Image (spheres, helix red, strand yellow):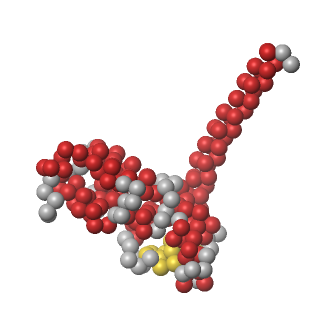
Amino acid sequence: MDNFDRAAETQYTMNGLLRYELWQLLAQTQYADYNGSFYKTGAFSDVTVTCGGHAFPCHKMVLVTRSEWFFQACAGRFREANSRIIVLQEDDRELVGAMLYFCYALDYDQPSADLPAVLFHVRMFALAEKYSVYGLTCLAADKFKKEAKNGADKAVLAEVVREAYDTISDEEGMFGRAIMEIMGHELETINLDG
């Protein structure tokens, strides 16, 4: 095999790898879209998550691959394992719906404008920690940063800091870094005492 053949083979291999990486990216996107449609329709659901009087038809296989808490609940360590119903009584229905949608589509939207977006993302981060939903803490922190950069009200930011301090353990410091990045020097001018 001469140098030209080796170069052609290397180029073919590199193109093949590039095509494979693009295919993987496309497959992941299609997977999220496909799973998102399963969430929206409830087709073939085998477990129902209830919260605030609303029933969310879900799929154990999706939930257990995204959340350690749901894995434990479905694997027999919680009373829910023998039932097809998981009750989340203490949580906000809109947040739970957005969290469950994330498990399928790897994204979430803020369902209503009743709550400032930056506060919604803080609460989503806290819920993701509570239920150990992989990837959702990162997404909530990123969405918080983007929303806060759009110019959140100082009073709302003060509420965000208070709520984050009260509800988030943030063992990796991810949300704390996001707050500091956005607010930095403004923390001194915000009244945190309420």
Relative height, residue 186 to residue 165 (above, below): above
Q: Quadrant of residue 16?
A: top right
Q: How many marks?
A: 0
Q: Is residue 132 visible?
A: yes
Q: Nearer the viewer, residue 136 or 169?
A: 169
Q: Which residue lies at the image location 82% right of the left edge and 18% below the top edge?
A: 5
Percent from the top left, x then y, of residue 163? 27, 63
- Tell me the quarter of the image containing the C terminus: bottom left
Q: Which residue lies at the image location 64% right of the left edge and 38% below the top edge?
A: 22
Decide if residue 1 is on the left or right side of residue 161. right
Percent from the top left, x then y, of residue 140? 40, 55
Q: Quadrant of residue 117?
A: bottom left
Q: Nearer the viewer, residue 94 or 175?
A: 175
Q: Which residue lies at the image location 16% right of the left edge and 59% below the top edge?
A: 192
Looking at this view, name the residue that lies furthest to the right. 1
Q: Is residue 113 visible?
A: no
Q: Which residue lies at the image location 58% right of the left edge and 83% below the top edge?
A: 83
- Tell me the quarter of the image containing the N terminus: top right
Q: Nearer the viewer, residue 191 or 43?
A: 191
Relative height, residue 179 to residue 69 (above, below): above
Decide if residue 70 is on the left or right side of residue 151. right
Percent from the top left, x then y, of residue 76? 60, 80
Percent from the top left, x then y, of residue 58? 56, 69
